[in-house]
Image (spheres, helix red, strand yellow):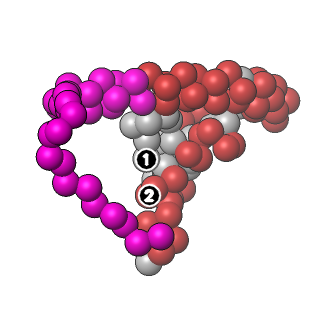
Amino acid sequence: MLPFALHGYRTSIRTSTGATPFSLVYGMEAVLPVEVEIPSLRLLMEAKLPEAEWVHTRFDQLNLIEEKRLGAICHGQTYQRRIKRAFDKKVQPRLFEEEDLVLKKLLPA
């Protein structure tokens, strides 16, 4: 059961990066098990390519993987700023002055 859960996790788009973990590691989207039994348009197109052209296409995909990873980093930074802005909207500033009573919690070290 765990391999199926891991496959689902690795092939679903993360909000923080805007890409799947699989595509960031391997530079292309994973072929789903269903697509092996019932070929999709993507698999049919790849099957019709001559080997030399397929190698060239794969080489181009691997060359663009760094660009894709940089895009994921930029997307992650934008996501973090958006989350921070949403959190900061909810925070209410509190001003303390001398002689104010405050509750201080001491956590075990």
Question: Who's the residue at 47% across and 70% down the image?
Answer: 109
Residue occupying the point 15% across, 40% down: 100
Residue for badge 1: 12
Q: Relative to 103, is 64 above or below?
A: above
How packed mark 2 is, by other alpha carbons closer than 10 Å (few <14, some 14-19, many 20 or more), is few
- Can you tell which quarter of the image residue 61 is in? top right
Quadrant where the image shows the N terminus: bottom left
The residue lying furthest to the bottom in this view is: 1
- Image coords of residue 71 (percent x, y): 58, 22
Q: Position of residue 96 (x, y in %)?
A: 20, 32
At a point 18% along the width and 48% down the height, the residue shown is 102
Numbered range of the magenta stretch = 80-109
Q: Position of residue 60 (x, y in %)?
A: 76, 23
User: Is residue 89 something one can see in this rendering?
Assistant: yes
What's the amino acid at mark 2?
Gly
Which structural element holds mark 1? Answer: loop
Q: Is residue 64 above or below residue 107?
A: above
Task: Give the left or right position of residue 37, taking residue 58 as reference.
Answer: left
Residue corresponding to mark 2 = 8
What element does badge 2 sit on? helix
Q: Residues within 10 Å of mark 1 (few under 14, many from 20)?
A: some
In-image side of 41 versus 70 (left or right): left
Q: Nearer the viewer, residue 40 or 5?
A: 5
Residue 43 lies, with reference to residue 85, above or below; the image says below
Q: Dots 1 and 2: beta carbons under 8 Å?
A: yes
Residue type pointed to by label 1 = Ser
- Queried whether the magenta region covers residue 65, the answer comes back as no
Q: Is residue 68 visible?
A: no
Work out whether residue 50 or residue 93 is closer to the camera in this orientation and state it. Answer: 93
